[in-house]
Image (spheres, helix red, strand yellow):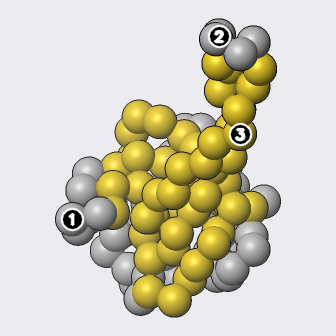
Amino acid sequence: MKKAKDLGIGVTAPKKKCEDKDCPFHGVLSVRGSIITGRVMSDSMQKTVTVQRDYNRYVPKYERLERRSQKYHAHSPPCLKVKKGDEVRIMECRPLSKTVSYVVVEVK
């Protein structure tokens, strides 16, 4: 049995094995670049989830913070069992489709 790959970012590999070629642990997909933490807003697509990241931005004119959010589409490997409402970490990878350039690497 093939062991799960170490991604080098301090996340533990899932116990369950999957046959997904786009899994960063059991497939051939490599990850690089930015790491984003957010909440899963939708899991209705096949093997894809929508992750929302909330953050604050300072507006110098009003000397206040404004609340902002951004949504990302991320590939969800079957070995992680991601569902709506989960807090996840996603990491950048090569483009998998028109809108998907991230993959879920950890469920918190």
| Image vertical order of residue 86 relative to residue 101, above or below | below
Q: Nearer the viewer, mark 1 or mark 3?
A: 3
Cα separation, mark 2 vs mark 1, equals 35 Å
Name which residue lies at 75% across and 74% down.
85
Does residue 95 appear in this view?
yes
Mark 2 or mark 1: whose residue is earlier in sequence: 2
Q: Mark number for residue 54? A: none
| Quarter occupied by residue 107 | bottom right
Q: Mark number for residue 60? A: 2
Q: Nearer the viewer, residue 42 or 19?
A: 42
Mark 3 or mark 2: whose residue is earlier in sequence: 2
Residue 67, percent across and down? 71, 39
**Mark 3: amino acid:** Arg
Residue 16, percent across and down? 63, 81
**Mark 2: amino acid:** Pro
**Mark 1: amino acid:** Lys
Does residue 26 appear in this view?
no
Q: Nearer the viewer, residue 108 or 9?
A: 108
What residue did someone put label 3 on? 67
Q: Nearer the viewer, residue 42 or 22?
A: 42
Quadrant of the frame with the C terminus? bottom right
What residue did someone put label 1 on? 98
Q: Nearer the viewer, mark 2 or mark 1?
A: 2
Cα separation, mark 3 vs mark 2, equals 14 Å
Name which residue lies at 34% across and 69% down.
22
